[in-house]
Image: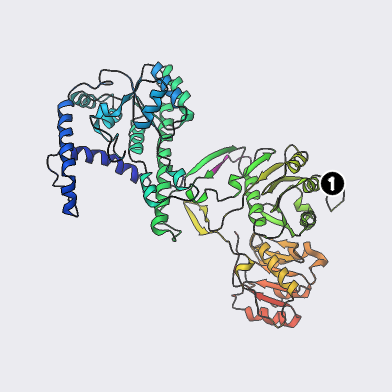
């Protein structure tokens, strides 16, 4: 969780609201509350009379013993939006001798299940009001939750006011997350009404006082809680874990409210002054990048990530559990292949695409992608942007390495948007360990976060594709239509290669790439070594400008017979690159877009 100082704001306001409301109802004067228009004061006067009457009634009753709890009875307070397994919990608590206090729909559900319930109004001597906004914000509730049993004056205060203690509090919150992410959206007014106030206040109160009060926010914990109570245990670690879970539950809830409200106020501004990212553990991993590093995988539960695609939400149909490096490589492969419009195969090794090919015939695209660098492709990740059917699955399963024509290609992962039933069956037969993932394309416009020591870097995702930019010819030689297409293909590939990055491509097929070198010349030489003689007449794309041209990368590329070069431009020596390409008759295209990838 990336936390912010503002995370607990909503819940702290909730707690204060209870005190304010109670004080307000006890006052005979409404002077401290000023209204903008006199008509409000007039129209509300009858209600104030009723409120005063009820408050006076409460004053008369408050010293009377509570119906339960004040005489040493065990009490459980239950208020749920998600009523999953509520009946079994209620019956279990009742069998253990707990008096159950509940609200509204929760009380009705318990009663329908045959559980005896004390309505919360019986303790507060005050009805639910303001369309349910005020139910439990009352000293008779929060006093019973927050009182420390080992502090004498706390217990004396409860006895003086006839307030009983609560031993168990079971609460979950209004389904704000589900409401605001529902198809079709939600109005601002409805969103506001789905912000829970009383629930977080009770959860935080019980979690703070967890030494004396068990707080339960997850139905998955019901059975463990009943067993704990049945055994009369006093394990403080169990209580602390439930308290941690409670605060985490509220923090995630508040982060969703905060994210939603920010979009309602400053929707176009991607970088708020502070924000919280709620993450949820999906799996523990065998290890991290290396065996001596412990690791785990978390799913981002931000509103922006709902139905937004990506490897994190992929379905694994088959194979060994995913590793830390598997996730990184699969993410790189999927992000790359998803950017191509035509049927495409991408092969990735150590997050770099070592083979990319687009063809109407996906079988041919697969073969060409592997052929680009069969040594690197072995043990890599294969990604497709089209459905994997039986024919393609058989080709993946049986394809032999182009290096010797005999060795069956081995892959760690295959990822695609979907599979036919037969295709999935055939692919599962390749290996028991082959991980088969079904993923949805990443939506554009996401916020990209990256951790550094003591902080985080945030940026917009790099969503630009060739159709979003202009390839400006700055050389004497204008590229042919096919050369321009090759340049665009190479440029889209180089976007996904680690800097310094060079890609050589022709006929919608990567021929060679150089990545991760401290200088651009070395990356260029690696790319040419892989491309071989096929580099003649091909397109070369660079992720950033060339700082030098003569007796450097640009001239070397021209001498090796490259047909067209695509680069951002922007160097103080751009004219040298233009003059060099003019000398060798090579087309030079400036994109004015850099694609660094660190």
Relative to 569, 201 lies left or right: left
Magenta-tinted stretch: 289-298
Does residue 77 lie above or below 283 as drawn? above
Q: Measuring from the top left, give residue 215's x and y in whole percent.
A: 39, 30
| Among the 4 quarters of the image, the one containing residue 508 | bottom right
* Label 1: element kind: loop
Q: Quadrant of the C terminus?
A: bottom right
Residue that mark 1 sits on: 407
Residue 347 colored in magenta in the image: no
Picture coordinates of residue 151, whole percent (x, y): 25, 26
In this picture, residue 518 sits left or right of residue 64:
right
Q: In which quarter of the image is residue 61?
A: top left
Q: Picture coordinates of residue 205 (x, y %)? A: 32, 34
- Residue 290 lies in the magenta stretch: yes
Residue 169 is at least partly visible in this image: no
Q: Is the magenta stretch mostly helix, strand or loop?
A: loop
561 vs 97, nearest the viewer? 97
Q: Which residue is pictured at 44% across the width and 58% down the height?
A: 271
Q: Can residue 295 be seen in this view?
A: yes
- Identify the residue at horizontal 74%, vertical 83% (top origin): 583
């Amino acid at each position: 969780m990336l936390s912010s100082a503002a995370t607990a704001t909503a819940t702290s306001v909730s707690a204060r609201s209870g005190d304010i409301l109670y004080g307000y109802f006890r006052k005979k004067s409404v002077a401290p509350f000023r209204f903008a228009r006199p008509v409000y004061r007039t129209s509300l006067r009858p209600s104030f009379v009723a409120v005063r009457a009820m408050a006076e009634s409460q004053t008369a009753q408050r010293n009377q013993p509570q119906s339960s709890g004040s005489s040493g009875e065990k009490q459980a307070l239950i208020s749920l939006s998600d009523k999953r397994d509520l009946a079994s919990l209620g019956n279990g608590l009742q069998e253990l001798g707990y008096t159950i206090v509940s609200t509204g729909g929760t009380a009705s559900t318990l009663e329908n299940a045959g559980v005896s319930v004390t309505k919360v109004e019986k303790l507060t001597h005050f009805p639910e009001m303001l369309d349910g906004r005020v139910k439990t914000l009352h000293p008779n509730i929060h006093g019973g939750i927050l009182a420390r049993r080992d502090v004498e004056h706390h217990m004396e205060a409860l006895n003086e006011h006839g307030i009983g203690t609560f031993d168990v509090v079971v609460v979950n919150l209004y389904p704000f997350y589900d409401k605001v992410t529902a198809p079709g959206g939600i109005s601002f007014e409805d969103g506001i009404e789905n912000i829970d106030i009383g629930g977080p206040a009770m959860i935080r109160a019980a979690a703070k006082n967890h030494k004396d009060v068990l707080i339960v926010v997850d139905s998955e914990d019901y059975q463990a809680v009943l067993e704990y109570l049945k055994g009369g245990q006093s394990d403080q670690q169990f209580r602390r874990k439930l308290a941690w879970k409670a605060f985490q539950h509220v923090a995630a809830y508040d982060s969703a409210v905060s994210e939603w409200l920010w979009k309602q106020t400053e929707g176009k501004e991607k970088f708020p002054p502070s924000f919280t990212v709620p993450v949820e553990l999906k799996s523990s991993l065998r290890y991290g990048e290396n065996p001596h590093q412990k690791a785990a995988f978390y799913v981002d539960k931000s509103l922006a990530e709902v139905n937004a695609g990506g490897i994190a939400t992929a379905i694994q149909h088959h194979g060994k559990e995913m590793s830390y490096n598997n996730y990184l490589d699969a993410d790189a492969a999927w992000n790359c292949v998803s950017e191509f419009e035509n049927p495409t195969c991408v092969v990735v090794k150590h997050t770099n695409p070592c083979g990319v090919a687009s063809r109407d015939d996906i079988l041919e695209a697969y073969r060409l992608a592997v052929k680009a660098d069969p040594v690197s492709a072995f043990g890599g990740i294969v990604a497709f942007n089209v459905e994997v059917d039986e024919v393609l699955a058989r080709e993946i399963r049986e394809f032999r390495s182009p290096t010797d024509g005999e060795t069956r290609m081995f892959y760690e992962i295959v990822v695609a948007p979907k599979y036919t039933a037969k295709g999935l069956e055939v692919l599962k037969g390749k290996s028991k360990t082959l991980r088969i993932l079904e993923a949805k394309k990443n939506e554009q416009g996401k916020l990209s976060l990256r951790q550094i020591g003591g902080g985080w870097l945030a940026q917009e995702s790099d969503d630009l594709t060739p159709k979003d930019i202009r390839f400006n010819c700055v050389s004497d030689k204008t590229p042919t239509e096919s050369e321009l297409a090759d340049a665009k293909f190479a440029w889209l590939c180089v976007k996904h290669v680690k800097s310094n990055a060079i890609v050589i491509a022709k006929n919608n097929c990567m021929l060679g790439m150089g990545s991760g070198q401290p200088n651009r010349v070395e990356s260029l030489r690696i790319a040419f070594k892989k491309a071989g003689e096929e580099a003649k007449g091909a397109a070369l794309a660079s992720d950033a400008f060339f700082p030098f041209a003569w007796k450097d990368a640009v001239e070397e590329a021209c001498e090796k017979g490259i047909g067209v070069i695509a680069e951002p431009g922007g160097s103080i020596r751009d004219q040298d690159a233009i003059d060099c390409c003019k000398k060798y008759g090579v087309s030079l295209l400036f994109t004015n877009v850099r694609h660094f990838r660190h």
